[in-house]
Image (cartoon, coloured by chain):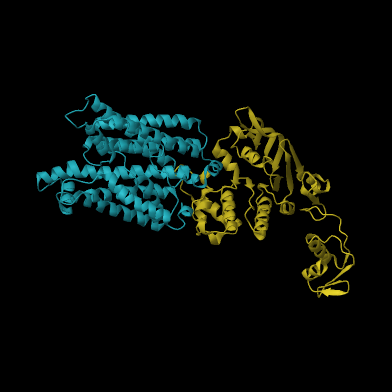
Chain colours: A yellow, B cyan
């Protein structure tokens, strides 16, 4: 079921000489129970699109429907009850505790005096539980790691209890494990909680792992939509990477460096062969005359009658 | 609200009451606490002169110190949160400079046209009216700009420029003014909490109450602003509406205090930081009250210190607040992780 729908929207910023167009004529639907990833190159208009969806930038033409009401006609508070957001920018007072930060998410539900009710405290607890940061509850923001702070920001958005969750590069400053944790969490939220989750990301491999729907913003007037698997098979995903320099490897599901045809003959188990070839390519050894044999348990490489215990030893030998 | 917050409120109010009594008792003539308390409660004074000193001089002065302390701290806190800038204070929008301009016109030009009443003194009301008009004029100009400006930071810069421009006009007026008028204006610029009649104290209280109304209704919005304007919007807060409430509130608070007491430095910038450090919170439900208590206490203390022992003279309040305020701000800036905590 779609909860947020854009119909032929044009977005832009006013300039002295008319309009600076950023998005023109795009239509799409954000669905419940689904993790959608928005991918596109820097400066293509992703952030502008997000501003539009948040009601912070009105479309020049076209309309954005929330439920079945026009976003323009809703008050900020009404929108806030439907859409919560995690942005890339943050200016945060360090003396706020995690609990207080998450409680800020209750703002649209509070009365003017801003006092939290029992119900509000429950929502905060639930958000802390879902993001698995209950034990950080009393910690101050300034003392958290980047990953913990990002989880706290996601918890704040969750406490807002909106059916739609929009995140702009939520994994940007995180380590490998942190990125996987966050994406797994977002996937879980979409599935278990039935929310519509939209994630802007540059991490294509991670996005393929977790998203059910891809929005590929190719240019200001072209957005390719569909499940990532369909887009990969149809070769559509290659449109993200124009030019010849890099290409998307269909089998590995990732972007790879361009490489010339290898004139190396490596024999042995597939898993080992892959890494040896990779190392030789990076060492710029694209042509090796004799066959290289690799063996597993114990790891051993044989070349021209010599035996090596590591790839480095092999490379050093060939270079000599 | 946590227990420690409430204890700090309680402790702050007790110290404030003590400071209030100390302020009244201290001066060229010392008056014991017991006499002040019994006098204020039962209106039973040992000497008529004591009654005169307490009721018509020291009591209103202490009250003005409390009122100005509250007003300046609350406007400073609003500015710092709205602009997300630790150096913002009640004067950044130039409204107080506007009040200064009004007074400068009265004193510097007025004297040139022989408008001085009874020799060399202006009536206090004429100063208040001139200050209010000047403040209101700049408030109007800032509002006109605010109408067109989109983001908070631009407004901050425009406000600072207004302040600079108005100060320049004051400099020009000062350059051409006579020595006597210039001295009067300079002394006004050093600030003064005393010498107000009860009618003026009531008027100031009324203005303050008016200026605090927008604050009370936007506590929730100020908390939302902690994460910046875009997050605030995403949580249903209208930054434009908050901007207007802030301009109106600080315009009334800082403008009227400047008109009545002259420009009082540092309280507005330093007190919100002190409150954040003592109460260890960023929650405005706590911070507005905490800043009020701290501000009232600080200004009361400064006023007590400004009384030179054994003399009828007292130091100008502005010099004392700056002498106390500057080390506080320096201490804050070199404190570790200060910027992270703001």
Image location (x, y in percent) of residue A256: 78, 53
Q: Is residue A295 above or below residue B200?
A: below
The image shows residue B22 at horizontal and vertical percentages of: 22, 52
Residue B4 x %, y % = 39, 58
In this rendering, position of residue A295 left or right of residue B28: right
Q: Is residue A186 above or below residue A215?
A: below
Outermost residue toward the right in this view: A290
How many dots with numbers?
0
Quadrant assignment, res B129 = top left
Residue B232 percent across, percent down from the top left: 53, 43
Residue drawn at the location 27% of the way across and 35% of the way down:
B203
Looking at the image, which is closer to me, A316 or A299? A316
Left or right, B283 with respect to A54, comes to left
Describe residue B126's horizontal placement relative to residue B142 as left or right: left
Looking at this view, name the residue that lies furthest to the left. Answer: B47
Q: Most extreme residue toward the top, as rendered?
A: B113
Tell me which corner region of the image, top left, top right, bottom left or bottom right, holds residue A81.
Answer: top right
One can see residue B205 in this view:
yes
Q: Is residue B274 visible?
A: no
Which quadrant of the figure has residue B56?
Answer: top left
Query: Residue extending furthest front?
Result: A320
- Rendered residue at 27%/37% (across/down): B186
User: Which residue occupies 64% across, 59% down?
Assistant: A175
Q: Is residue A68 left or right of residue A98?
A: right
Q: Nearer the viewer, residue A40 or B236?
A: A40
């Amino acid at each position: 079921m779609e909860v947020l729908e854009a119909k032929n929207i044009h977005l832009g910023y006013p300039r002295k000489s008319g309009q600076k167009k950023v998005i023109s004529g795009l239509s799409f639907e954000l669905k419940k129970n689904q993790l959608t990833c928005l991918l596109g190159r820097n400066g293509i208009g992703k952030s502008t699109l997000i501003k539009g969806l948040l009601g912070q930038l009105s479309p020049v033409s076209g309309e954005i429907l929330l439920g079945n009401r026009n976003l323009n006609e809703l008050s900020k508070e009404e929108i806030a009850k439907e859409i919560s957001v995690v942005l890339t920018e943050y200016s945060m007072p360090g003396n706020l505790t995690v609990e207080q930060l998450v409680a800020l998410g209750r703002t649209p539900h509070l009365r003017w005096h801003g006092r939290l009710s029992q119900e509000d405290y429950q929502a905060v607890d639930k958000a802390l539980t879902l993001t698995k940061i209950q034990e950080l509850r009393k910690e101050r923001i300034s003392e958290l790691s980047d990953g913990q702070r990002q989880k706290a920001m996601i918890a704040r958005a969750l406490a807002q209890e909106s059916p739609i969750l929009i995140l702009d590069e939520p994994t940007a400053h995180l380590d490998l494990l942190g990125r996987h944790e966050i994406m797994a969490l977002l996937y879980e939220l979409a599935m278990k909680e039935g929310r519509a989750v939209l994630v802007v990301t540059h991490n294509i491999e991670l996005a393929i792992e977790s998203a059910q729907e891809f929005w590929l913003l190719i240019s200001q007037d072209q957005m390719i939509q569909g499940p990532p698997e369909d887009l990969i098979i149809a070769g559509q995903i290659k449109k993200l990477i124009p030019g010849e320099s890099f290409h998307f490897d269909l089998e590995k599901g990732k972007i790879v460096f361009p490489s010339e045809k290898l004139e190396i003959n490596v024999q042995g188990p597939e898993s080992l062969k892959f890494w040896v070839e990779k190392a030789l390519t990076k060492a710029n050894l694209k042509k090796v005359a004799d066959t290289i044999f690799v063996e597993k348990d114990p790891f051993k490489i044989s070349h021209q009658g010599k035996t090596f215990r590591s790839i480095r030893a092999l490379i050093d030998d060939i270079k000599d | 609200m946590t227990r420690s917050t409430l204890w700090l409120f309680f402790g702050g109010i007790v110290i404030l009451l003590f400071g209030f009594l100390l302020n009244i008792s201290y001066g060229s003539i010392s008056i014991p606490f017991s006499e002040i308390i019994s006098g204020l409660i039962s209106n039973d004074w040992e000497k008529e002169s004591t009654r005169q000193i307490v009721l018509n001089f020291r009591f209103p002065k202490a009250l003005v110190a409390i009122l100005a302390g509250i007003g300046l701290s609350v406007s400073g806190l609003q500015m710092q949160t709205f602009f997300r800038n630790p150096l913002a204070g009640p004067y950044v929008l130039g409204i107080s400079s506007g009040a200064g301009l009004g007074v400068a016109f009265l004193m510097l030009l007025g004297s040139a046209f022989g408008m001085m009443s009874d020799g060399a003194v202006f009536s206090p009301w004429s100063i208040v009216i001139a200050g209010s008009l000047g403040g209101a004029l700049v408030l109007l100009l800032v509002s006109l700009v605010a109408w067109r400006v989109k983001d908070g930071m631009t407004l901050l810069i425009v406000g600072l420029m207004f302040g600079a421009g108005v100060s320049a006009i004051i400099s020009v007026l000062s350059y051409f003014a006579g020595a006597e008028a210039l001295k009067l204006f300079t002394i006004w610029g050093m600030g003064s909490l005393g010498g107000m009649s009860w009618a003026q104290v009531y008027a100031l209280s009324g203005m303050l109450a008016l200026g605090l109304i927008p604050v009370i209704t936007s506590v929730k919005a100020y908390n939302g602003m902690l994460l910046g304007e875009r997050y605030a919007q995403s949580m249903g807060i209208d930054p434009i509406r908050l901007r207007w409430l802030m301009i109106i509130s600080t315009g009334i608070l800082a403008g009227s205090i400047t008109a009545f007491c002259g420009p009082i430095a540092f309280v507005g910038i330093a007190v919100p930081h002190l409150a954040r450090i003592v109460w260890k919170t960023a929650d405005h439900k706590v911070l507005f009250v905490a800043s009020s208590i701290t501000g009232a206490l600080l200004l009361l203390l400064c006023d007590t210190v400004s009384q030179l022992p054994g003399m009828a003279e007292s130091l100008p309040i502005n010099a004392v607040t700056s002498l106390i305020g500057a080390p506080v701000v320096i201490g804050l800036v070199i404190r570790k992780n200060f910027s992270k905590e703001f």
